[in-house]
Image: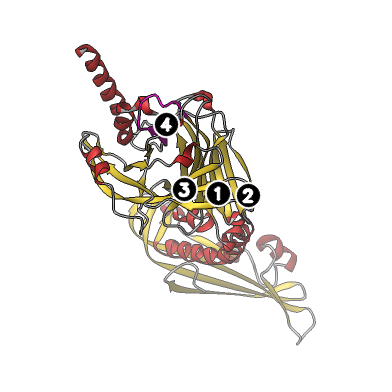
Amino acid sequence: MIRSLALAGLLVVGLLGGLPAVSPAQVFMASRPNPPFTIGPLNIRASVSPEMAHLPIDITWSLVIPEGTPAAAAEGDLFLLWPSELLPETGLGPPDPTLARYVEDRGFASIEEGRIALTARKLSTSADRKQETLPGGAPFVTFVRQGPQGLTSPASYVRIPWDPRMAESGWLMRLTLKTKGLIKKKPNTWTERAFWGPRSRLLLSFQDVNSRGLFTLYFERRAHVVRLAEDPAQLGIDFAQADHLKIDELQPPAARRQLSETRDNTDTVRLFLDRSEGITPQTLTVQFGYFSDLQSWAPILIPIAFFALGNLAAPVFRLIGLRLARAFRARVHVGSPDRATVTAGGVVLGAETLARIRANETTAEEVRQLLGPPTEEVEQLGGPGKHTLVYRSRRLTPQRGRSWGWIATVDHWEEELQEVDIALDGGVVSNVQARVRRTRLAHPDAE
């Protein structure tokens, strides 16, 4: 006996130490072990909208009692383990202190108490269909535990008072929950939020008791778990404003998405539960986000914006680049110190070259062969056959300061402008004049 208890204790410790911190769950438990009834049909439905502070969830169910089993065998309160914090409804009465004592005796701390709405709806013809609210609703307690691995996620323990209509086939019970913390915000960048809106993840599950906050209560009363009946059971999420909804991920693949048959502009996601899975967790995960009217145009507006900005920014960046290059050239010279002089325009004519041009001997054709085409040719109207060939050139020389090989700072630039006028009379050179002007410049691109 002692050995069995020790093994059970080691099992609990091992499971609690290796399980995730957040694991949404939903388990029904009976007052007595090995309940002779099952639960079905079962429908767990969450309702999501863009601007919501808390997630409302409706749980509808009925009990199925096998033939030959006395109705008294099913009598007794039901209990619900829920994986998140619940918010109390006002006007239903005070909390049930026995629930808080129950969880506190097991090492948990109560952080919220109250009651939630419990109703019964009769299913028959539309004329006789009616809904009744059970006075006092269902009391609950939300609890956490501080352990070696940190604070557990909030979980809730709900007591559902017994009502004879739970076991009647013509009635469905409904528990209305106002939950907190089931929708998890997905981290994203500000650009993703601006263009595509924030993203969130919602996970609903059935019979997943792996969280540290729920496993202890489940392990103690695992013989009280109510199994699924053969009637349909499903997890569902209703998304309002479907025209502004974007679902990025839907798991498992068996889940179905379709338009709601009863609500306008609403998408529904459904997962039918498999009763053959037993206590195996069955989960429905949806990653989604809502976008605004402006964000819906993002696939069109973003390319247009980039195209417009590209065309507008090109001249600006070109101007900035030219100014930076100009400032760099004005203060830094890269190149051989022996070849620092730069010819900016025309051909520089040295004294030896000009000495080869003799008045009254050299012809115009010889000048062109020696010097190349002129920069400018001036025709004189005073006499026929008289004109002037003009050759201009521009040289820039940096005055280097500190030098590191081919790289040196520049104190200033010197500009040398040369202009040579060769007068022709009858196709022969009559006069040669050369003028040189030197100027100090702050940078080589100055006019």
Residue shown at 50%/39% (left/top)? Answer: 61
Do the residues under discs 3 and 4 have CB atoms within 8 angstroms? no
Indicate the amino acid at tag 2: Ser
Nearer the observer, 264 or 182: 264
Return the disc, 3 or 1, that comes first in the chain's sequence: 3
How is this picture coloured?
secondary structure
Q: Position of residue 13 (x, y in %)?
A: 26, 24
Q: Main secondary structure of the magenta part?
A: loop
Q: CA distance from mark 1 to mark 2?
A: 8 Å
Do the residues under discs 1 and 2 have CB atoms within 8 angstroms? yes
Q: CA distance from mark 3 to mark 1?
A: 10 Å
Extreme right residue here?
384
Indicate the amino acid at tag 4: Ala
Q: Residues within 10 Å of mark 3 (few under 14, many from 20)?
A: some
The answer to whether residue 116 is above or below residue 70 is below
Return the disc, 3 or 2, that comes first in the chain's sequence: 3
**Which structural element holds mark 3?**
strand
Left or right: 336, with 361 as reference point: left
Instruction: Check disc 2 and report the residue beneath it.
Output: 260
Instruction: Check disc 3 and report the residue beneath it.
Output: 57
Q: Position of residue 184 (x, y in %)?
A: 42, 46
Instruction: Check disc 4 and report the residue beneath it.
Output: 72
Tag shown at residue 238? 1
**Which structural element holds mark 2?**
loop
Residue shown at 50%/62% (left/top)? Answer: 321
Left or right: 403, with 272 as reference point: left
Q: Residues within 10 Å of mark 1 (few under 14, many from 20)?
A: many
Q: CA distance from mark 2 to mark 4?
A: 39 Å
Q: Residues within 10 Å of mark 2 (few under 14, many from 20)?
A: some
